[in-house]
Each structure stands twice: as structure tokens, then as C-alpha cells.
Amino acid sequence: MSCWPNILSDKSLEVVKNAGILLLQREIPDSVNIQVAKAAQSAGVSVILDAGGVESPIPPELVAVVDILSPNETELARLTNMPTEDFEQIKQAVGKCHNVGVKQVLVKLGAKGSALFTEGEEPIRQPIISAPKVIDTTGAGDTFTAAFAVALAEGKSQKECLKFAAAAASLCVQVKGAIPSMPERKSVLQLLHSN
């Protein structure tokens, strides 16, 4: 039984149930995320939770309906109360996420790239795709996670999803501002073809 009130109508949740994937973030109330994630899960729609936004612990009720948790190193350290200064420490912190029921953890590692950890498997690492000039990193993590979600919804392999997301983030850091820096698909594909 949920301790959170239902906020959205059944009609509103139909959009979620027909989605290819659901990407959530913590800048909206956990109660809304929980309701939407449960609707997605009931319809077989995968749920990705970007851990950015609120610094409070993620409610267990939300963790239970998340397929992929996507923190950066700092967020992972905060969520697990563990250091994340090197890859071995990151693996240990991710293990703590697996212990509470998160099967996949997509960690954004800044200049060190990214890694997807699936419980019981070796992590898949993706280096950054270098940008000729970094102007503003604002929104790069959001762009990365959103691009990963798009590629996953399109049925790409995990490695392809990571590379697509890395290309999107590379383009993002070359433009000032969070919204203006989110690249168009055409630009991401051009960068992928040139690498």
C-alpha cells in the first residue's frame, strides 16, 4: 500500500503507459515520480531515474519501481554514503545500490566518461567523446541520461546507448546554457559517424 497520495488522473497516466520509456528526475515531488513509475511498471515500460535534483534519500517505494538509476559520482557518493574517488570505490557504491534492488546503475563520470553496471555482469565503460572546446557543462548529465533513454527506447544495445549518450553530452558542453545546449538528433548522428 502506498503512503503517497495519487496526484495524476488515470487519463493522464495513459500517456505514461503508452510510452517507449519513462525518464524521471528528482526536481519534481517523489510522490509524483512514484505514481508515474508505478503506472509505467504496470504497463511494462522501463523506468530510468536521474538521481540529480533533490539531495534527500530516494524513497524505497520509488527505488522498487526503477529499472535504471542514473547518478553522477557525487550523487552516487551521497546516496550510498560511500566514497567514489576511483573506479573500485564506484563499483562498491554501485553494489550498495544493487543490494537495495536497483538492477542497473548508469554512472556519469564527467571527464572519465560513463559506466553502466548491470547486477551480476561486468560494467560497460564508455569514454567521453572529446569536444574541441568545453564552454559550459550545465545540462551535460541531463543530456547524457536523456540521450541514453532515447537510444534504449529505440532498441539499441547497451554499448550503442552509451556511445549515443556520450556524443550528445559532447555536443552539449560546447554550447552555453542548459536548454540551448541540448543537441538535435541529426547533430548527434553526425558526430557518431565522424568518430
Image (cartoon, helix red, strand yellow):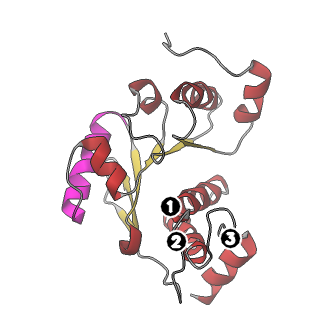
Label 3: how many Cα within 10 Å (few below 14, some 14–19, many 20+): many
Q: Secondary structure at mark 2?
A: helix
**Location of residue 118 in the rendering, given as x and y in whole percent from the top left corner:** 37, 51
Label 1: how many Cα within 10 Å (few below 14, some 14–19, many 20+): many
Q: Is residue 113 visible?
A: no
Front: mark 3 or 2: 3
Instruction: Work out how far the residue at label 3 is from the one at label 2, CA to CA, in angstroms.
Output: 12 Å
Q: Which residue is mark 1?
A: 141
Front: mark 1 or 2: 1
Q: Nearer the viewer, residue 179 or 108?
A: 179
Q: Which mark is residue 183?
A: 3
Q: Which residues are magenta?
A: 85-101
Q: Which residue is mark 2?
A: 166
Q: Is residue 122 left or right of residue 17?
A: left
Residue at position x 31%, y 33% in the image: 100
Residue at position x 31%, y 42% in the image: 79
In the rendered image, residue 97 lying in the magenta stretch gets the answer: yes
**Location of residue 179 in the rendering, given as x and y in whole percent from the top left corner:** 67, 62
Residue at position x 54%, y 27% in the image: 34
3 and 2 marks in contact (CB < 8 Å):
no
Judged by its main secondary structure, the magenta piece is helix
In the rendered image, residue 150 lying in the magenta stretch gets the answer: no
